[in-house]
Image (cartoon, grey):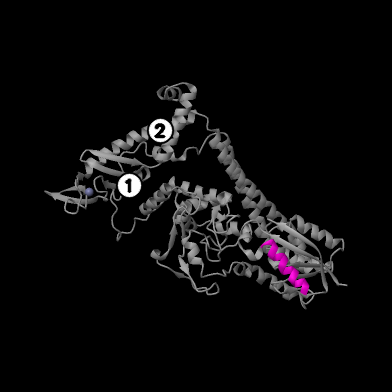
Amino acid sequence: MPKYKATAYIRLSYTDDRSSESDSVANQRKLIENFVERNPDIEVVSYKVDDGYSGIIFDRPAFKEMMQDVTNGEINCVIVKDLSRLGREYIETGRYLRRVFPAYGVRFIAITDNIDTAQESSGDDLTVSVKNIMNEAYCRDISVKTRTSLDVKRRNGDFVGAFTVYGYMKSEDNKNLLVPDPYASRVVQNIFQMRLEGSSALRIANELNRLGILSPLAYKKNHGLPYAKKGYADREDCKWSATTIICILQDETYTGTLVQGKQGTSNYKIKQMEQKPESEWIRIPDAHEPLITKQDFDLVQRIRGLDTRTSPKQDTVYLFSGVLICGCCGSRMTRKTNRVNGKEYHYYYCPTGKKHGCANPVMLKESKLIDCVQESLKAYIQNVASLETLLNSIDQSSINQALAKEYTAHISENERRLEQAQAYKSRLYENLVEGMITKEEYASYKVKYTRQAEEIKASIAALKEKLTDVLENRSERNRWITHFTQFESMETLDRKALIHMVQSIRVQGKNELDICFNYKDEYEKALRLIALAAQEAELTIPELLRKAG
Ligand SMILES: [Zn+2]
């Protein structure tokens, strides 16, 4: 007759664990069965499975059922594959191990962590091992077993990393495919949007912190997702930093391109990662759903180039550098300066020239070019402004609904965190009395959780204000329009205005410029929307505009 009546407890978290075969429900079960076969003093009387629950919270249905069996005295042994199945939060996990289970005379076994309270001589050792195991769990879980096949997979456009880029998660059906993380992907989109509207990286970081949006590292920790230990440049207090923002703004992954093999080591225990040259990276375009259009991404990179043009050693970037293209051969046109009688004249010309195969190379005076482009831009800005007036006059409830949904998601995320902080705080005294933590730890945790709760409350208030704004139909719609209208009163054409509005200028001849504006798709979409509205109202567009204005 076996001495121990055991519950085998199995937990699978909602995203990343699925990618690791070794943590599937079937595998956890098999491992426990094998263990019990070797230990005849144990009989498994029940299996409890929490599928899709994070290890950070203990409010899981199967876990609660198991604890009911414990308190009813129906079982006296709990078996898990590894400690993190029980929980990933170390004070609470430790409380079960050191206080709750011993109080009910329950033997606890975490097979792969070699924890067995029937064998353990001292409880203090257990606390130490809990701490260490919590820290090590991820590294072990994600050690990649089949290194040789990785490059093949990378070249197929399969995602093979252990950690996903912030904003994406692994698909539940295909562990090699990245899919947008519903919450974090919207944060990424907002970061790009704020950048395009002219915010600096620091200002974006401050705004996200003000709204209580979790930084990438804090988000992954908070959701019990695996994270790279040195993978983020978040501030030490787990807040957004300007560096984190810059990293996100430069990451091509968000355009749907999978970039892998940037660095390599011979195995996961060797800490020294070697950075590989860019030419050896494996880049697969359209590997997954983009969060940012290629056009917006390129624009952000161009704006960044403008901001960093402060060093005197750097080559000067002229007004039309990179934007002006020879309509005949497609070369980027070059600027040159001629001096006549001590006066300077600037020109742009096709560097290919007749000699190297350009059939019709043109040369343009910069001053003439500026006049011409400035006139075109002014006219276009007027168009966009009228478009805005029209858009404002038609029903935008669908756009606002999407925004409202986004803010509501941020608010509930913050409310969940607030509840969590308050629950931890209220349990602190209990932990102190039970000797789980020292007086000093009690004091510092109390301060920490109190401050955290205050910060979250402030964020919720700020978010609710934004939500009200949206619901009252005031702000933030058609944000691309501001890229143009912000230059409405522009006196002289500068590089910032040019880069914000213009994708490229093709010089077709001395008097013919073909200007390709940014946000062409959005512009056309708006036009279609307005045409539709005009049709429904049985008005022409000028009539509609008169009515709206
Ligand atoms: Zn040319």
Q: Is mark 1 within 8 Å of ligand 1?
A: no
Q: Residue at x 88, y 72 (%)?
A: 1
Q: Amino acid at mark 2?
A: Ala
Provide the residue designation for mark 2.
385
Q: CA distance from mark 1 to mark 2?
A: 21 Å
In the image shown, does 147 or 429 lie closer to the viewer? Answer: 147
Sort mark 1 into few (<14), some (14-19) or many (20+) by Cα contacts within 10 Å. some
Above or below, 123 against 348 in this view is below
* Quadrant (top left/top right/bottom left/bottom right) for the C terminus: top left
Q: Within the image, what quadrant is residue 491 found in?
A: top left
Magenta stretch encompasses residue 30: yes
Residue range of the region highlighted in magenta in the rendering: 24-37
Left or right of 480? Residue 335 is: left
Q: Is residue 346 left or right of residue 180?
A: left
Q: How many marks?
A: 2
Q: Main secondary structure of the magenta part?
A: helix
| Residue 247 in sight | yes
Query: Does any portion of residue 441 appear in the rendered image?
Result: no
Query: Which numbered dot is residue 495?
Result: 1
Say if 468 sits above or below 240 in the image: above
Camera-side residue of 445 and 98: 98
From the top left corner, tell me how far across and down residue 69 is, in percent. 84, 60
Q: Nearer the viewer, residue 31 or 534?
A: 31
Secondary structure under the numbered disc 2 in the rendered image: helix
Q: Nearer the viewer, residue 432 or 54?
A: 54
Q: Is residue 418 above or below residue 144?
A: above
Residue 419 at x, y = what percent? Answer: 69, 52
Q: Residue at x 59, y 37 (%)?
A: 468
Residue at the extreme bottom: 121
Image quarter of residue 431: bottom right
Mark 2 neighbour class, 10 Å CA radius: few under 14, some 14 to 19, many 20 or more: some
Residue 328 rendering spot, x and y as whole percentages: 24, 46
